[in-house]
Image (cartoon, coloured by chain):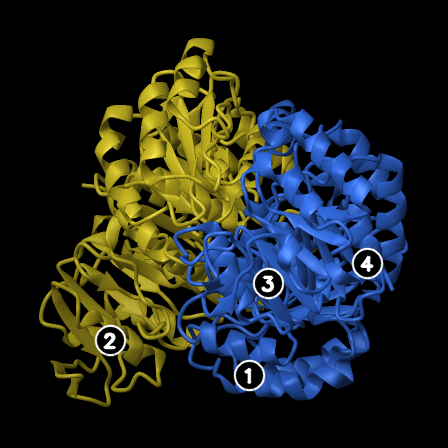
Chain colours: A yellow, B blue
Amino acid sequence: MNSLSPFFNPKSVALVGAAHTEMKLGGVVLRNLLRFKGRVYPVNPKYSELMGIKAYPTGAHIPEAVDLVLIIRPASEVPDILREFRDKTKSVIVMSSGFAEIGETALQEEVRKTGKEMGFRILGPNCMGIFSPRCGLDTFFLPRERLPRPKRGNVAVVSQSGAILSCALTAVKEANTGISKAVGYGNAIDIDECDIFEYLMQDRETSVVVSYVESVGDGRRFVKTARALSESKPLIVLKSGKGASGQAAAYSHTGRLAGRYEVFHSILRQHGIQESSDFDELIEDAKALSYQKRSHGRRVLIITNGGGSGVLAADECMRQGLEVAKLPPDKKERLTGIFPKFYGINNPFDLTAQVNDEDYVTAMDELKDDYDAFLLIALPNVLGITERLSGLIKNIKESVGKPLIFHIPRGGIAGKLTRALEKARVPVYPSPESAVRGLAALLLRDDLPCPGGRGERS
Amino acid sequence: MNSLSPFFNPKSVALVGAAHTEMKLGGVVLRNLLRFKGRVYPVNPKYSELMGIKAYPTGAHIPEAVDLVLIIRPASEVPDILREFRDKTKSVIVMSSGFAEIGETALQEEVRKTGKEMGFRILGPNCMGIFSPRCGLDTFFLPRERLPRPKRGNVAVVSQSGAILSCALTAVKEANTGISKAVGYGNAIDIDECDIFEYLMQDRETSVVVSYVESVGDGRRFVKTARALSESKPLIVLKSGKGASGQAAAYSHTGRLAGRYEVFHSILRQHGIQESSDFDELIEDAKALSYQKRSHGRRVLIITNGGGSGVLAADECMRQGLEVAKLPPDKKERLTGIFPKFYGINNPFDLTAQVNDEDYVTAMDELKDDYDAFLLIALPNVLGITERLSGLIKNIKESVGKPLIFHIPRGGIAGKLTRALEKARVPVYPSPESAVRGLAALLLRDDLPCPGGRGERS
């Protein structure tokens, strides 16, 4: 058993700083814990019961050892609270802020030392903690009305920053995909991204890991662990603190130094660790990887019902190092016989505004063995595009067996079509370029150490 | 009067190819023309009346000269239709496709020559035509249920491609802004982007021009006209057909050659013409420019309630050549006395998850004279961010008098807050990086020939 298991799958949880109202952070967390599938022990000396659960004045009063202790009390109280749990737990999340991020390095060091003396693993301080839908654990101090949680799924999010973690959860939900584990690890006095990577490596629920990193404690270990994780499942890193101003900001945010970005970037690339250049790209990549499996190759077929959108997609393919290869001459001839003469039987394949849903399938059937990946563009504002399209795609998807992504701009029937396609595990993107970037994240290429080919953009 | 005035502000319109049902493109256009504020003459030999309007068998039967003729009949009929309107009009839009884009160059040349003989100005062929909300003209063959039209506003969209034009309209609507004129000019046998730029230069309704260009007929004229337009109001160009595959796609799409992109790009830059690197950026830029005026400078203050989001924004500032300058020491000292000690009184200015709406105003009041532009980040999943924030910002916006943009990630109260802020002319972006790019589009810098500093990304 990995030493982080109690953090992601505890049977019992104590919450020090539990409150009776959601006007307090400790109340928000307690409310979330009502969904937890194990035992909950609120700790608060002023109440004998909170939200219908028996409360305890101190940790020492809890009648059993607990798998996980959550602390959301003022920073100065944290060392004593840790001592209260001597021999009562092995795993603690300190959500409280007020440590190195505001210059209180001595207090943070005291927490670290105390935890070590007690034999605890500590997540935090100054962190959001953990959202683990499988066991219903949710330590986030953001109410569900304010931050709707995504469904259970296969994406793990690992973020030093709570802000980025919450934005990532919102984006994952919007992408109609789901979360296996989400972790905000804050100041990282003990558990850091590497420990979490090691845990996720063997987590069967997780098939893609998204990691927002501001600073790295031990660079060598980071690269080693990230590389090992990358070899077992897709990992996408978004490193911030890239410039002088970003670095200063990252330091005041978590109290860890951000380091020289260029060095970090080139090391990642060299070790085949995939990097996104900004937040949107991180989510675009994660979406594709959560829906479909990676495969080898770089030859992309673009089928579109809007010429301009096809051209923009072809441009982005070039930027991503993908090849918009010509149709094989025999196939071109055959398709010219099948389709109206004003269709553009090329790559991009232009079905024009006169398109019908079936045209995509006809073209795919003919060409599926000639390309490594497929970008289908459906502008939903012409009458020939209907909701039937998703069913047709669902039927051919298995026989294609390669990355297949849609660009459907927002508006009209786009919402319905998108949900139906995504239910069939075909991700949909709102712009031609974002769709191509999603496709690039799925393509392993022999000419590049890692998918995406993002070095040039960042 | 500019010779394009009849295209954008006609008093009377004839539609050749008008149909009785929206199952036909000519019916969709006729339905749209019911909103036109002038006289409409449907032309169709099979009907004496269409959608409640008297119809005419040919153009020659129309009892007056008409300002604008729309043709949506098969390509081969177009030359004869033009002749029908001899001395009856000066302005024609040929929406029909089936010309150079599918190799029918001789037919296209015949249309061009015939138009010239008749003394017509021609828009198209193979085009969407014009949406001009002021007079209610809408020649797009896409039904409103499929392509909801944006409200009247100050953004002009000029696009060779109908697909990109329709995507841009959807995006403009989503950005809560509006359209002054939208033009899809297709194969451009007569009227091209330059003619339209010249018209828009003197159009008072238009304060920003967005132009999607696949190919340019006369490069020298393009640069001259685009430059002149740029000097009178912001123009943002998205040039596609950048790579070999994109160029081939652009050719088969409109039958004009796309040219070598690198040359085009460096010429644009040299002449101070602003360029976007992809569709999303085009819309991000247009949004900022439609909401606020450009001003000089590069010093940006970032105020955030989420540390990580501030760091990502600072990174993007660096990439955009903007400076996240430190707080003046005296201001820093004063603000440290005002705010809780765990706030990060730096740039980015970190109000933390303990934020209150008023904090943004307090910080802005103190620092508004020390920076050239302001990026405010409000993660709406903490309780301290409420809908009151938009009112507070509205009140201080005038006294700031410089570019001021928000990043608010989607979810929770973000929708309501966004609509209220945008009503107060403060644009809101869903990611930190897109917000910074929007801000960059508003900043004129002495070190760069044009705003945005995008050369490196594309």
Q: Which chain does the numbered disc 2 sit on?
A: A
> In the rendered image, which residue does mark 4 sit on?
B199
Q: Give the SS element for disc 4.
A: helix
Closer mark to the observer between disc 3 and disc 2: 3
* Residue B245 percent location from the top left of the image: 60, 24
> Mark 3 packing: few (<14 Cα in 10 Å), some, or many (20+)?
many
- Residue B402: mark: none
Residue ID for mark 1: B389
Identify the residue at image location x=40%, y=34%.
A225
The reply to whether discs 4 and 3 touch (Cβ–Cβ < 8 Å) is no
Q: Amino acid at mark 1?
A: Leu
Discs 4/3, front: 3
Residues under labels 4 and 3: Cα distance?
A: 26 Å
Distance from the alpha carbon under mark 4 to that under mark 2: 63 Å
The amino acid type, in three-letter code, at marker 4 is Tyr
Q: Which mark is residue B41?
A: 3
Q: How busy is the neighbourhood of tag 1: few (under 14 within 10 Å), some, or many (20 plus)? A: many
User: Are dots 3 and 2 on a single chain?
Assistant: no
Residue B106 found in image quarter: top right
Query: How far across and down, in percent of the image, does residue A11 sit?
Result: 13, 59
Q: Are marks 3 and 1 in contact (CB under 8 Å)?
A: no
Q: Is residue A253 visible?
A: no
Name the mark nearer the viewer: 3 or 1: 3
| Same-chain status of marks 1 and 4 | yes
Distance in Å between CA atoms under marks 3 and 1: 51 Å
Label 3: state its secondary structure.
strand
Left or right, residue B152 beside residue A420: right
Q: Which mark is residue A30?
A: 2
